[in-house]
Amino acid sequence: MAREFQRGHKAKISDLTAGTDLYVGVQIAGSGLAFDISCFGLDANEQLSDDRYFVFFNQPKSPEESIQQLGAQSGDTESFRVTLDRIPASIHKLSFTATIDGAGQMSQIGPGYIRIVAGGEEVVRYAFTGAEFTTERAVMLGDFYLKDVWRFAAVGQGFDGGLDALLRNFGGEVAEEAPPAQQAPAAASPGFTPPPQAAAPAPSFGAPASAPQAPAPAPSFGAPVPAPGAVPQPQYQQPAAPAPVHAAPTMAAPLAPPAPAPYGQPPQPSYGQVPGQVPGQYPGQVPPPAPAPAPYGQQPGYGQVPGQQPGYAPQGVPAGAGLAAALQPYKEAPTGTRWTPQNQQLMRVDLAMGGQAVLARQGSMVLYQGKVDFSYKGAGFAGRIVGNATGQEMQLMRCTGRGQVFLAENGAHLHAIELQGDGICVSAEAVLAFDESLQHEVRRIEGHGIPGGALFTMQFQGTGTVIVKTHGVPVVLPVTPTTFADSNAIVAWSSASQVIISSQVRLRRNAYPGHSGETVNLQFRGAPGNFIVVQPYEV
């Protein structure tokens, strides 16, 4: 039975099928619209460094035929054959895309899908509709990507430009052709020649036994490729008009600074981001330096679309593009993991991924989608006694179901810390939410006591994610024998660190009335690999 994916879902190919000879079908349609459906073979930097692995209507297969475009069949607008064990080591991702050939927008399309078939059985399907898009003219449907092993991700990310803009986004170049070349005779259009293996059917390749949108029976291994000697019917013809058929990209830039990357992770580009473009408000992206205002009569600065009037509107939004384009920078971030930051202050958890409940601070839900149940999570009598005595009591709610929950609290910065069998110590006040699979308990800090009752902390251990709140952007430092932190500014530390109270340094503070005049510092010790997290704020 085929697994139904939602946008952002990922899975190992080996978890879907044992085969490596796969059929990929794409169904997309809209009234009066024509589509170009392509596959980009990208390198480790997600660039089209070898244009022979751009498989489209003018180049229907890669050199070693590990990627082949097969044409329309079995209800699919376009289909491909992908042989994973034959893809060269230089190719790390296959991105399947659909672009509108001519005028139109992706919001005009009807229900469609991208599916994977192995051994004649459909193993996964990602369905989408035009309601998920606005003015985009292209969409990145799904990816095969190499991360230790081959995996599949349902992307569903819109892109404002057409096929040429998408090609430039992946580092390719669009060749300028003279008008006569645009009007080549039909005989020059490439046919789909049968691969060398067509004579002997592969055991794991084929389309499903039936397709929901076509009465014709599903193709076997040899069906996607015409028999030797037959005259194939190419799905796409070269456009007759000499004018360009694709518009330039109109990607939008943010109004506010982007969020920092999660702890210990490098910045990652978002889907649809054009090289050199000001990135959107997704975590892990670093904004470029702010440009100086352009003198009157000169060209706009970095990231501004030529012809756009300067002002406070998001850069990259063309004049008169409307409300949908103006709000483009603030669209929901694509999901691909259980926990996905939407910006610096908003976190989304997909309860359907992982199949376990989430414990969140009461009142932290600001939005949810799908079927979600919220219930009170009590700590029990003993837990309440310990929480009250140590100041580490947490008022929690339990979130279950198969929807998506958005969490935030008072505009605090949120950080997802994933634990893989290790542990972290966090004050209960700094915890927003965590996976129910994590074990948590109150831990005592060694020493003679801390003013204000900050003698205890919460320790989380196991496999799962804990969402930590900070005031501002924190700093993560390695633990050394001379690492000291203000107890009012420390947020978290690795549970393997040894923590003791330091009485060697006490500074008098007169910053605000009513302060005790003293501060307590914590000294951290531990083996290499331990860390502390400090915020630019004192509680």
Image (spheres, grey):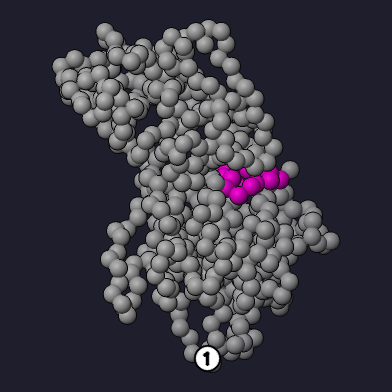
Q: Residue at x 46, y 32 (%)?
A: 467
Q: Is residue 194 left or right of residue 313?
A: right
| Residue 66 % position (x, y) | 55, 60
The residue labelled by disc 1 is: 179
| Residue 24 % position (x, y) | 64, 57
- Quadrant location of residue 33? bottom right
Q: Which secondary structure, mark 1?
A: helix
Reply above or below: 170 against 181: above
Q: Which residues are magenta?
A: 2-20
Q: Is residue 36 left or right of residue 459?
A: right
| Residue 6 % position (x, y) | 64, 47
Q: Residue at x 57, y 53 (%)?
A: 155
Q: Quadrant of the N terminus?
A: top right
Reply above or below: 79 against 509: below
Q: Residue at x 19, y 14 (%)?
A: 503
- Quadrant location of residue 514? top left
Reply yes or no: does residue 4 show up in magenta.
Answer: yes
| Residue 436 % position (x, y) | 55, 24
Nearer the observer, 539 or 30 = 539
Reply above or below: 52 against 156: below
Nearer the observer, 269 or 397 = 397
Q: Quadrant of the C terminus?
A: top left
Figure disc tally: 1
Reply yes or no: does residue 521 show up in magenta.
Answer: no
